[in-house]
Image (cartoon, rainbow, N blue to C red):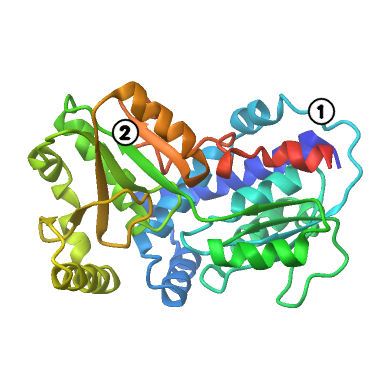
Amino acid sequence: MTLDRRIDAFSKLGERLRYVLDAENSATVPSQEFEELIQKATVLNPWFTPSNVRFALSSWGQLLSTPQLTNWVSSYDMTAIEAKTVAIVMAGNIPLVGFHDLLSVLISGHNALVKLSSQDAILIPYLVSVLAQTDPDLASRVVFTKEKFQGFDMVIATGSNNTARYFDYYFSKYPHILRKNRNSVAVLTGQETVEDFTKLADDVFQYFGLGCRNVTKLMVPEHYDFQDFFGGIYEYHEVINHHKYANNYDYHKAIELLNGTDLLDNGFLLLKESTQYSSPIGVLHWESYKDEDLLRQKLNQDQEFIQCIVGRNYNAFGSSQQPALSDFADGVDTVEFLLKT
């Protein structure tokens, strides 16, 4: 199967997603199948709200176009690929979080043996079924399993810091990419506008903050005034109406108050001073800095914990949940790994 054919198949998948979502938005054609898909996904995982599922599907609809796919793979040599079987252990913290790995495996000419997360077991099989409508041969390269992996050559596994230890034990003898927890950071200078904060709110609250590209920590100048920040993120105040988010917010607020922790609270988000990058749902950590050059050094030293940085001198505010095809998790080029292993 040629690379052009693989690109064409994924491009048609993107066309299908764009068509269904555009049709749904304009109400010009029935979309019962699509609505049933979203309902099943939200029932399986209450964190997968209809708006979050649509956002994830829409994002992939925009990425899966012939120009973007062609540009993405243009820097790789895929002319002489010996097809291997790649075992993929997928996470399920946000909708379709494992699809990039699947795309990378298939676009590279390999076969995928996939173990889905129980939290995201609906959406990816759906995309593969749509892919099968345009290119059954490509879709046949994907096998979903709930059993112990057998007959594979490489591994890509994503999980928590705890599961990574098990991944390392079971898969250490195979060529592998093993991912752990990472979080994202926003660097504020005090010169941000209301528009900046509004976009930053997307980085914080999209998917309820469950993704590794969600901002979980603010780096701010000394004596920073959070008033403008709170004003800029207010559009997300209804997040507190989601029962699981509200439970997390209430729980962590109670714990921190019992511990006598100083908190800033706007009624739907807690700000806590902390050196930790990872923060619980409903909580955003912050840490002050004195010198921007020293801050850059610190962030470079801590890069193994950081997925993405947004700020005026970094990635644009509002862009953390809109990665390009070349924005690989943990900064590890998955396609290069697949081609050179």
First reached walking from the N terminus: tag 2 or tag 1: 1
Describe the element under mark 1 as helix, strand or loop. loop
Left or right, residue 201 beside residue 99: left
Q: Which amino acid does label 1 sit on?
A: Asp
Q: Which amino acid does label 2 sit on?
A: Phe
Where is residue 132? Give x, y as percent. 72, 57
Mark 2: few/some/many CA within 10 Å (<14, 14-19, 20+): many
Which mark is drawn over residue 317?
Answer: 2
Q: Residue at x 15, y 40 (%)?
A: 229
Left or right, residue 87 beside residue 198: right
Where is residue 274? Give x, y as percent. 27, 51
Left or right, residue 280 beside residue 73: left
Left or right, residue 339 beside residue 311: right
Mark 1: few/some/many CA within 10 Å (<14, 14-19, 20+): few
| Mark 2 touches mark 1? (CB < 8 Å) | no
Q: Which residue is drawn at 63% across and 68% down?
A: 116
Describe the element under mark 2 as helix, strand or loop. loop
Q: Which residue is drawn at 31% across and 46% down?
A: 217
Where is residue 230? Give x, y as percent. 12, 45
80 vs 57: above or below: above
Which mark is drawn over residue 77?
Answer: 1
Front-most of residues 179 and 118: 179
* Quadrant housing the C terminus: top right
Front-most of residues 83 and 54: 83
Q: Which of the 4 image quadrants contains residue 85?
A: bottom right
- Can residue 222 be seen in the rendering of this structure? yes
- Can residue 160 be seen in the rendering of this structure? no
Where is residue 163? Give x, y as percent. 60, 67
Q: How far apart are marks 2 and 1 (CA)?
A: 34 Å
